[in-house]
Image (spheres, rainbow, N blue to C red):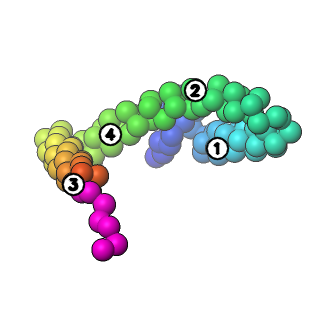
Amino acid sequence: MSRRHCCSGSCRTRSDANGGVIVFELALFAVVFIVLGRRLRPAAAMTTGLTVLVPAVALVVIVANSVPVIGVGLLSALTGALPASIVFACTLAVLAVAALIWRRRSTATSSTPPRGDG
């Protein structure tokens, strides 16, 4: 029985070690930049940090878009397409309602004038 993991599709490998290597490389990259960043002047460190931030944000966007698709794919493999689609739709509905509630609360608190001390 073959097991699937995070790298099995994109890296075309069945080795569990590949996922660990990727996480290790990311951690090593972060440590190197932290150590090197401490030696830079503040302006240079800020510029370097902002330059590195651009691909990091792109990676987060790609992962954030992939997670629901992967989740629906796994759920549909286990339960079928219809239950997976229903769960996905309900999850989106709950997130939309939560966003509306959060928006109303933040709007209500920001429009309330500050009270004086008497």
Q: Is residue 116 magenta?
A: yes
Horizontal side, residue 69 vs residue 86: left or right:
right
Residue 6 in the image: state x and y as whole percent. 51, 40
Q: Nearer the viewer, mark 3 or mark 4?
A: 3
Residue under the point 76% across and 36% down:
42
For residue 108, the mark is 3
For residue 23, the mark is 1
Q: Secondary structure at mark 3?
A: helix
Q: Nearer the viewer, mark 3 or mark 2?
A: 3
User: Of the residues shown, which amino acid type is indicated by label 2?
Assistant: Pro
Q: Indicate which disc, 3 or 2, sits on the residue closer to the N terminus.
A: 2
For residue 55, the mark is 2
Horizontal side, residue 44 vs residue 23: left or right:
right
User: Of the residues shown, which amino acid type is indicated by label 3?
Assistant: Ala
Residue at far right of view: 39
Instruction: Measure the alpha-carbon separation of dots 2 and 1.
Output: 16 Å
Instruction: Measure the alpha-carbon separation of dots 2 and 4.
Output: 21 Å
Residue under the point 30% across and 74% down:
118
Q: Nearer the viewer, mark 3 or mark 1?
A: 3
Q: Which residue is mark 4?
A: 68
Q: What span is in magenta?
A: 112-118
Q: Secondary structure at mark 2?
A: helix
Q: Nearer the viewer, mark 2 or mark 4?
A: 2
User: Of the residues shown, which amino acid type is indicated by label 1?
Assistant: Val
